[in-house]
Image (cartoon, coloured by chain):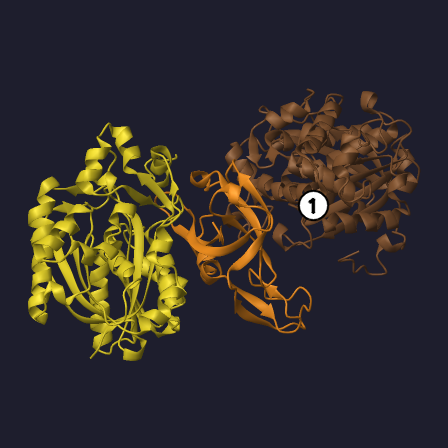
Chain colours: A yellow, B orange, C brown
Amino acid sequence: MTIGIVSYGAYVPRYRIKIEEIARLWGDDAKALKNGLMVYEKSVPDVDEDAATIAVEAARNAMARSGVLPSRIGAVYTGSESHPYAVKPTSTIVAQAIGATPEMTAADFEFACKAGTAALQVCMGLVGSGMIDLGLAIGADVSQGAPGDALEYTAAAGGVACLIGRNESELAAIIEDTYSFTTDTPDFWRREGMPYPEHGGRFTGEPGYFRHVTNGAKGLLEKLGTTPSDYDYGVFHQPNGKFPRKAAKMLGFTKEQIAPGLVVPKIGNTYSGSCLMGIAATLDQAKPGDRIFATAFGSGAGSDAFSIRVTDRIEEIRNRAPTVSELIKNPVYIDYARYARHKGKIRLA
Amino acid sequence: MSSVPRFWRNIGVRYNLEGTRCKECEEYFYPPRNVCVNCRRMGELEPYKFKGTGEIVSYTLIHTAAKGFEDQAPYTLAIIKLDEGPCLTSQVIGDIDKIQIGTRVKSVFRKLGEDGERGMIYYGTKFVPLDP
Amino acid sequence: MPGIKARSDWPENGVDIMRDVAIIGVKNTKFGELWECSLRDIVVEAGIGAIQDSSVSGKDIDALYIGNMSGGRFIDQEHIGALIADYSGLSRNLHVPATRVEAACASGGLALRQAIMSVASGYSDIVVAAGAEKMTDVGSDEASSALAAAADREWEGMAGATFPGLYAMIARLHMHRYGTTSEQLAEVAVKNHRNGCLNPIAQYKHAITVDDVLNSIMVADPLHIFDCSPITDGASALVLAPAEIARKYSDTPIYIKAIAQASDTIALHDRRDITTLDASVVAAKRAYSMAKLAPEDIDLVEVHDCFTIAEICAIEDLGFAEKGKGGVVTENGETAIGGRIPVNTSGGLKACGHPVGATGIKQAVEIVTQLRGDAGKRQVEGAEYGMTHNVGGSGATAVIHILSRER
């Protein structure tokens, strides 16, 4: 059974705030932050954008790129840690907005930054088992960072949708295999009803990100009997610019392999969209036959690794929807005051 | 507007620009009409999904917001003529400097409003300039 | 003319109405923020005033029509007709039928039309037509929201449309197409404030300048706050009688020469052309036809200047200015008192105030006052014919009356 990506679509809001602007407010050293985080600016949603609107725009781009009838979709799963409703699915909004309703199932996912890839794995299972024809997996976030918290420098907005199917002639990329590595590691959380997440500071690094990413990646490489040199590209969850570079190095991937998918310096961490954004940016320029190795990480904690092989069809569908680089060009820079308003940090009575 | 059923029954119209077209006189209607304004009971209306492209007929930058839209002010409101013919009223996203009478626009999915912090969130269609 | 599908047997097309009708008594309350007064207080004041002005007595009254847009939203009170009849002393002993008429800001004009038809038909003799709105019991946000319900709530309101916003889009296209300027819009407000200074009941009795308008805060670009009519409490009433017996009650009856009404789409975006209110054009055509008069015959007009651009469109749509020239005509002073066609001698909605349900009646009260020669410093000398033009929403309803000094 061959399962893969029929189509994909991304969306990034047009607004950006620079690290300097956030640092100016809190009296931080912008240069040191940029060197440390390797992030220079981050995307900011408009006042009328949230994870649902971003998921819809990404899903519509995926549908435009696919050319398939939305009625073929049997499941829509949206991963996010900023679902606009605590109870009431984002995925029904998306499904309705792409015309996939009503003969389908839908649910929302949450697993910190890897909810999108978790949704993707579930779609693989349903498609692979024959339960559904096509499944739409989305990772989208308008992630939260408390004012003055370190997260504020990176918590960004964006989303990616992947249409998963099994008809070989329709696949733009084959997912050769996937592997997950999961433990209970409370490195980052947000309690019910709280507006901003809490995190374990440096504890999020070694026991969180690096342990799970490297074990997840190694697990899949061992399972497939492959090595980093078998891949043309590597994508690792990018909460900042530093972590994926370090993880890649630990695993034996080169700077060149990860460069096309490393979008975090320009848009920040799109959380549930982060790893998928890297995959989308890589698919935007991969050639037929290229292989992509990707590992998503979600705090809490776990990793999902994927081995992907691009097919001839990528050339046909690539230009039917905007590429990630097209989406992130011509940003509109805003100051902290406007950012605070866009993010709802200023509350109107 | 705090009525869930009132919003819900038009979700397809708001999300996906679903309108109607009279088979008799071939005029398109958005929002959908059940009676053709030209043919009245002799007309026959069928569902039609609009492409979502059009141009600005007129616009304003609203400073004093409508109730429930305060958090979006100032916002651009426009009458947009869809390529199929009918006009609608919608917000246009983006810099007011980029918006003129005749500017080409396309539809996007946005939050229209919400009933406070506890109530429902209303989603639907707004427009952006085709060449922002 | 687009959209005219008039039936040949309508009075507008020359078929005589059954009876001529006259206005025999009028009264406006003070317009403004009447904090001490309730809706019933002001309607009773206007109603009693109009009855006193006419010398009829309560037991002569056959029916009451009251224009009120949104008692439900403004004072949380429906069943306005019964309330007013009751507090006017017309219910418990006399049981006079009372009917509330609603057509948003044209509610007053429409109440007058219904009252006239009631007398003309022979069904009633003495009828009171009143209009009232109590708008300041709620905050301005709530008041604006209530007013916004005159537009298409689902397909304009849900997009964030406000009334200033809708008229701003009319203004924008009018400026784009005809070269109308913000200064010309401001001239409407300047003139109407000048007139308001001469009207004892006006909400605003201070003069303003073009710069005052242009420097006032922007509400919906290109409309400033001084381009907008205010939120107002007020009531107006008049008493109608068949023309043949009018002199029994009044030395100076004023006669109805035409009543005309027309509809257009509820949403501005569905109109043929947003810079023309087709409902106004059609209603005016019907009115001129019924009165056998032309725009040149009209000596003064009260038009629905809910926004400055609305007056400019109105004088074009009613035939007092060429299409697109409304701004120029205003700038040239042709619509001022003493000009070619004085417009809004009362101060209009802009300066006299706009208690929405009362406005259409107040317009008729002003014309009656002028035709009687009782308008004091704002008197249009020798006025024979006057017109009222009352609009609902952004132009979905237009109602026009032509009044005459001679029968």
- Percent across and percent down for residue C264 are 69, 53
For the image shown, how many numbered marks are present on the structure? 1
- Percent across and percent down for residue B38 are 69, 66
C347 left or right of A1 in image? right
Residue at x 22%, y 54% (from the top left corner): A259
User: Which quarter of the figure has residue A303?
Assistant: bottom left
Camera-nearest residue between B19 and B80: B80
For badge 1, the amino acid type reads Arg
Quadrant where the C terminus of chain C sits is top right
Q: Is residue A8 above or below residue C291?
A: below
A167 left or right of C396 in image? left
Mark 1 belongs to chain: C
* Residue C155 visible to an observer of this rendering: no
Q: Secondary structure at mark 1?
A: helix
Query: Which residue has dot 1 on it?
Result: C177
Residue at x 12%, y 40% (from the top left corner): A201
* Residue C270 visible to an observer of this rendering: yes
Camera-nearest residue between C175 and A99: C175
Disc 1: CA contacts within 10 A as few (<14), some (14-19) or many (>=20): few
Residue at x 35%, y 64% (from the top left corner): A62
- Percent across and percent down for residue C189 are 69, 29
Camera-nearest residue between A86 and A212: A212
